[in-house]
Image (cartoon, rainbow, N blue to C red):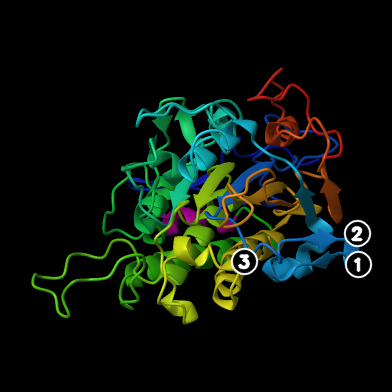
Amino acid sequence: MPSHHFSRRAFLRGTGVSMALPWMESLPVWGDEARPQDPSSEAPVRLAVLFSGNGFHSREWWAKGDGPAMELGQVLSPLQEFRQKMLFIRGLYNAEATKGNIHSSQTGNLLSGAPLASGGAIRSGTSLDQLLAQTYGRSTKVSSLVLGCEKSNPSVHKDYSMLYSSHISWTSPTTPTPLEIYPALAFDRLFKDEVSRGDQSVLDAVLTDASDLRRHISSGDQRKLDEYLDSVRDVEQRIQQAGQKGQLQGWRPTLDKPNMQRPADGIPQDIAAHMRLMADILVLGFQTDTTRITTLKLNNDHSSLRFPNLGVDYMIHHLLSHSDSADWLKVNNFFLEQVAYIARRLDAIQEGSRTLLDNTMLMFCSSMMSGNHNNDQLPVVLLGGGGGRIQGGRVLDYSGKPERQMCRLYLSMMDKMGLRPPQFGDATTALEEI
């Protein structure tokens, strides 16, 4: 029977760089000890929370039926292929978010259910992802990865800080988790020992170690290693090219031509490229077990993103949300396509008898049902199997039920990752159906 020849955390290493390896049949890197009956060990459960602000088209966010016969509204149409690995959850709400104003006070406690301070003060609650990061996430190089595609807004709106509408992840009640919007820095966080933008390619730094590893793994794992290294190289090259297309997001220049020298590349100016890079970094983080917890905020609530890539260039996201127009549906579909892309990539990565999507809980949500600010129920889709612990292909409807707190869902999700607090937010019991 094979035994562990590598430490629990298997890495490729180079000068200033360490890259955790994906699951391989030859490298039982996830178990604390070799199991005689299962030398390859079982892959861990991952959590990904994706968020987009301002809700969705009021008539096209719906699902009905079960399994392959499940029908989806037009907003959710990009998820058709994942119906059997999806839970559509209707009727949950966040009681504290119904107090206060619109936007800010509807978003800052989305993942905690905590009361929010008004008057421009900052006080929320530790969010679901960060509570898990402080426990479950400690066994990985990066306890959690918090990504975004739109800058934080530090202003105050209707007596509430707009930082609430800019952050869904909170390290503590008074500390929104720093949001990484630069793909290069997010990439460095995963693979470089010191987070800097540095010129050295991550792959170039570890090629010697990778060549040595190939001699000790099976032919199947050699192919898996090559595919993984190719995906890392692809992300590196796209980061280098980011910002060159000139499709501006969110704001418009006041000059036709620049009156200063062009600065170095930073945030991609093509929003589609920006989101896709962040999606691929999320997948890499899970694939290598460098992190097991990621939040990706695709935009702010009260967002000012524009979408020239969709031919919708005349109105910002927030204003579009107030119209159930064809353009609003087009933007909704664009966001759901990012969710589908991540799910598709995760589902293509095999981890033993399951896929990486099967070992993940991928939650997509917003802080209101539609642009009319209605949050008496919240839009929630959960993709993935949570390590074989969640049965997909179902619609769960909690509308009209007395105990329909969003935090009950979070207790259920934490349970799949081995964390069982007696209470979270305003909930004391998990949802039994999850």
Tag 2 and tag 1, C-beta contact below 8 Å: yes
**Three-letter code, disc 2:** Asp
Position in image of residue 208 (x %, y %): 43, 57
- Camera-nearest label, 3 or 2: 2
Relative to residue 40, is residue 322 depicted above or below?
below
Figure quadrant of the N terminus: top right
Residue 265 shows in the view: yes
Q: Nearer the viewer, residue 236 or 93?
A: 93
First-in-chain label (3 vs 2): 2
Q: Which residues are magenta?
A: 206-215
First-in-chain label (1 vs 3): 1
| C-alpha gap between disc 1 and disc 3 | 22 Å
**Three-letter code, disc 3:** Tyr
Q: Is residue 286 magenta?
A: no
Which residue is found at the position 36% from the left and 47% from the top?
152
- Camera-nearest label, 1 or 3: 1
Q: Main secondary structure of the magenta part?
A: helix
Few, some or many C-alpha atoms within 10 Å of disc 1 (few <14, some 14-19, many ≥20)?
A: few
Relative to residue 251, is residue 96 depicted above or below?
above
Going by the image, does 364 lie left or right of 351?
left
Q: Which picture quadrant has residue 199?
A: bottom left
Which residue is found at the position 71% from the left and 65% from the top?
59
Numbered disc 1: secondary structure: helix
Position in image of residue 159 (x %, y %): 38, 35
The residue tagged 2 is 66
